[in-house]
Amino acid sequence: MPPKNSRSRPRRQPSYRLHKARGCAVVTINGKNHYLGKYGSPESHEKYARLIAQWQANGMEVALAAPEGNAALTISGLILRYLDHAEAYYKDYGTRHQGEISNLRQAIRPLNTLYCRTCIREFLPEHLESIRESMIERGLARTTINHRVGRIKRAFRWGARKGLVPAAKYNGLRAVEGLRRGRSKAREPRRVETVPEGHVQAACAHLNRHVRAMVAVQELAGMRPQDIRNLRTCDLDTTEDVWVYQPFTHKNDHLGHVRKIAIGPKAQDILTPFLKPDKPEAFVFSPREAKEAVLDGRKKARKTPLTPSQRNRRRKSNPKRAPGEQYTENAYRLSRGAQNRQPGGA
């Protein structure tokens, strides 16, 4: 008989081990041995991870048998083809849309980890639920899990459209509904709230002049970070008392939506020194110009004369990290430092 307090003990995860008699890898789940193939091989570790995920998804009671692959297209083959398609499809005016590509890779990673060698025809809706359960165990928020599972379904939908995935297979995966609020073990996301004004002011004290102006205009006009980074003089209509900014690209541009942003007097006063009527298609806020302003400020504030070696020193013609003409998402998000820090850019 099991000990009286056995129910209170946490269930230990079955271990991956060597079956000495057979000379192969094995895992024992609920008293049943599952042979995984050659000990230490990638295939055996994949099957082990897949069985554990299915065991956890089924309440640590039943482990589903791992399907054997065949000559048909595998999950990894579908992933490679879909990522090639995504690299070409998700473009933003000639530049790869890094955000969506990164989100796709994060969503597909557990699919590739658990089922990369599984045949497409043998991938079942309960396998997708296993992947979702692994995301819950990692502590991801419910909405994040739903978005990632949706991206996995999108990969199969593309495969069905290209004849790589049977239509019935994709329709079966569609039956896996998204997690609903209060109906799953997934944690709920925290509500995104407005940043306290005191925090904004404290951060602005450590930003260079260009980034400080970007933050102020974004706050006054209610812009997205993408809007302020993409601001160009030619996109501004300054004929009225309230200026109108129409970004050349924005979040919902692919849906055919037109975005117009009103810019009032306070934001106009901040923007005016940075506008470039002689270069209307250039970005208003440029990391290269910000760096030049930092260097000029250092030169003017210098109290000792330049030495001959400093005077004859030449700047590198092709530096490894030369600032660009536009702030990237990460450069704007991570910009810190006052006049003694070189700003980043793309």
Image (cartoon, rainbow, N blue to C red):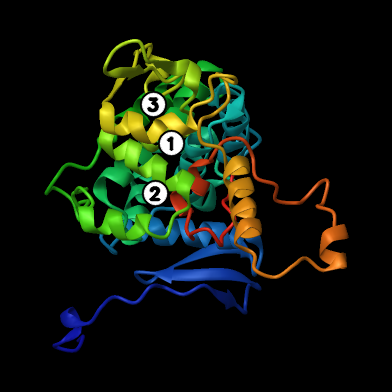
Pinpoint residue 286: horizontal percent, then vertical percent.
56, 38
Q: Is residue 344 left or right of residue 225?
A: right
- At 42% from the left and 60% from the top, the residue drawn is 206
Pinpoint residue 263: horizontal percent, then vertical percent.
30, 25
Q: Quadrant of the C terminus?
A: top right
Query: Where does label 2 land, which residue?
Result: 131
Disc 1 residue type? Ile
Q: Can residue 239 be seen in this snapshot? A: yes
Query: Where does label 3 land, which residue?
Result: 251
Q: Quadrant of the N terminus?
A: bottom left
Spatial CA distance of label 1 from label 2 is 10 Å
Q: State which tag comes first along the sequence, 1 or 3.
A: 1
Q: Are marks 1 and 2 in contact (CB under 8 Å)?
A: yes
- At 52% from the left and 43% from the top, the residue drawn is 105
Disc 3 residue type? Lys
Is disc 2 placed on a helix, strand or loop? helix
Between circles 1 and 2, the one closer to the viewer is 1
Pinpoint residue 110: horizontal percent, then vertical percent.
47, 50
Q: Is residue 187 left or right of residue 82?
A: left
Spatial CA distance of label 1 from label 3 is 22 Å
- Is 77 or 273 nearer to us in this picture? 273
